[in-house]
Amino acid sequence: GVGIDGDAVKMFHDHNVSIKSAKDLSSLANQKLGGVSKQWSLSSLVETLTSKQPKKIRLGNWESNILSKEQLQYAATDAFASWYLYEVLHSFPDLSEHQNKD
């Protein structure tokens, strides 16, 4: 995902779940898309790569022991979008290497 390292730390602290393999999509996007490096958001990646603007959903208390149906759907969509974007970005050639040679 985007900012996945922070999510992994939170999962470990809150639920004692250790994430062994995580790839930050913002870094991968910079590597694959080239241009000036920037801090991508999940929203901006989805919009850029799929030409669709995802709905801006601001949901309640993520610290709650019980999440709402909407929060669960949002989390599942976030996870799926992250996986999908990884697959799309991973298929691109590395443009950052070519720009560094110029």
Image (tube, rainbow, N blue to C red):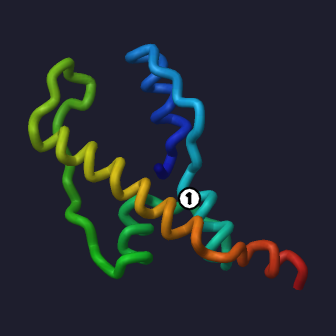
Residue 94: name its quadrant.
Answer: bottom right
Q: Position of residue 5 (x, y in %)?
A: 55, 37
Is 46 above or below relative to 21? Answer: below
- Image quarter in which the C terminus is found: bottom right
Residue 55: name its quadrant.
Answer: bottom left
**Which residue does the numbered mark 1 point to in the structure image?**
26
Residue at the (36%, 77%) spot, across then down? 50
Q: Residue furthest left?
A: 69
Residue at the (47%, 50%) spot, across then down? 1
Specify the amino acid type for callout 1. Ser
Horizontally, is 29 left or right of 1 in the view? right
Horizontally, is 24 left or right of 99 in the view? left
Residue at the (18%, 46%) spot, across then down? 73
Horizontally, is 25 left or right of 30 in the view? left
Q: Position of residue 43 (x, y in %)?
A: 36, 63
- Badge 1 marks a residue whose secondary structure is helix
